[in-house]
Amino acid sequence: MFTGSDYGNLRGSEFWKSLLVDLDHLLHPNDHFITSFANAAAFLGQSMEDINWCGFYFFDGKKLFLGPFCGKPACTEIQLGDGVCGAAARTKETVVVNDVSTFTGHIVCDADSRSEIVLPLIDPHGELIGVLDIDSPSLSRFDSFDIQGLEQVRDLVMRKLLASGYTTLFKQ
Ligand code: SME
């Protein structure tokens, strides 16, 4: 199985192009949706340089709860509007924070985190499914290639989820 260690010196759009091809092969429509999210988190965690946390929070209709991830144990629940994750969930927009110490309300799960990107997962009806959250120990880790690449990763994961017969799996 591809582990992400073969990317060598690929950077920018070339890195993301290769990663997306491999992630597409890794995620099988017949896998349980939790399996796909778990492998996606592990794959990103292995493939992206200079990150210390990568994973999913799901939305149960009221709050975000911790899903599959790669990194240190993290806070289990986040209210809408709280922290970077809650901001992305509430606005349904990607949030990039170059220096988490400047983000009012940032939730510290791993004290090593310096910058962060959170992308919302939205279903075709516009309903919030959850978020993809990635932290780095470096300031300003995420550039425009990463934003675009991760939005494509998010879209791919959502396509796999919908192909697996998703309806409203996370709602209480
Ligand atoms: N820093 C996030 C909390 C989640 S952890 O980074 C895994 C936030 O402010 O929402």
Image: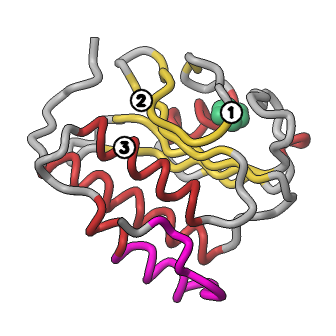
Along the line of sight, the residue nearer the viewer: 98 or 127: 98
What percent of the width, then of the height, locates residue 39?
A: 39, 49
What percent of the width, then of the height, locates residue 126?
A: 28, 42
The crowding category of the residue bearing disc 1, from other C-alpha atoms within 10 Å (few below 14, some 14 to 19, many at least 20), is few
Q: CA distance from mark 1 to mark 3?
A: 17 Å
- Label 2 or label 1, whichever lies nearer to me, is 1
Question: Tag 3, which secondary structure?
Answer: helix
Q: CA distance from mark 2 to mark 3?
A: 11 Å
Q: Say the numbered circle drawn on residue 72.
A: 1
Say whether residue 76 is magenta. Answer: no
User: What type is the residue that disc 1 sits on?
Assistant: Lys
Q: Quadrant of the C terminus?
A: top left
Which residue bears the numbered disc 2?
Answer: 58
- Label 1 or label 3, whichever lies nearer to me, is 1
Instruction: Write down the region rendered in magenta.
Output: 3-21
User: What type is the residue that disc 2 sits on?
Assistant: Phe
Q: Earlier in the sequence, mark 1 or mark 3?
A: 3
Q: Say the numbered circle drawn on residue 37.
A: 3
Question: Tag 2, which secondary structure?
Answer: strand
Q: Residue at x 60, y 70 (%)?
A: 146
The crowding category of the residue bearing disc 2, from other C-alpha atoms within 10 Å (few below 14, some 14 to 19, many at least 20), is many
What percent of the width, then of the height, locates residue 35?
A: 30, 40
